[in-house]
Image: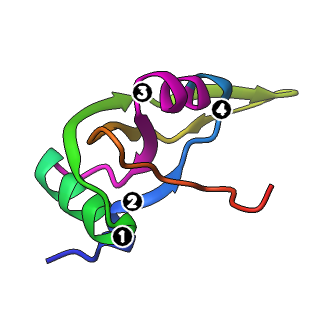
Amino acid sequence: MKSPESIILRPMITEKSNSLQETCNQVIFRVARDANKIEIRQAVEKLFGVKVVDVRTMRLPKRWKRVGRNIGQRPSWKKAVVRLREGDKIEFFSGV
């Protein structure tokens, strides 16, 4: 079994994720590519001590990047939008 730390890689802190967190009680995470919805739900509940209502996942494709004459690829990755129970909250920046 995978550890929760290897499933949840990092939270995505953007303007859109902040507005989703305030209005819809949803949090966006970058997750391991091979993680499924059940593993993501269990990892979030164990790491943050909250109750997860719904998990939606997206696989984002690899991107071609060019720097001068050189061309390369950025790897594909997976993100999860996790909806929390009413009243639960995850604080990433406390004390600010």
Compare marks 3 and 2 and give the one earlier in the sequence: 2
- Mark 2: amino acid: Ile
Q: Residue furthest front?
A: 87
Crowding near the residue tagged with mark 3, few <14, some 14–19, many ≥20 C-alpha atoms within 10 Å: few
Q: Residue at x 69, y 60 (%)?
A: 94
Residue 77, image x, y percentages = 42, 41
Cα distance, mark 4 to mark 2? 17 Å
Residue range highlighted in magenta: 17-36
Nearest to viewer (mark 3 / mark 2):
2
Compare marks 4 and 3 and give the one earlier in the sequence: 4
- Mark 1: amino acid: Leu
Numbered badge on residue 61 = 3
Q: Residue furthest right?
A: 68
The answer to which of 2 and 61 lies nearer the viewer is 2
Q: Is residue 72 magenta?
A: no
Residue 9, image x, y percentages = 46, 59
Is disc 3 in contact with disc 1, using a CB cutoff of under 8 Å? no
Q: Secondary structure at mark 4?
A: loop
Quadrant of the drawing holding the C terminus: bottom right
Crowding near the residue tagged with mark 2, few <14, some 14–19, many ≥20 C-alpha atoms within 10 Å: many
Compare marks 3 and 1 and give the one earlier in the sequence: 1
Q: Is residue 86 left or right of residue 26?
A: left
Q: Residue at x 35, y 44 (%)?
A: 87
Numbered badge on residue 47 = 1
Q: Secondary structure at mark 2?
A: strand
- Mark 3: amino acid: Pro
The answer to which of 30 and 51 lies nearer the viewer is 51
Q: Which residue is mark 4?
A: 14
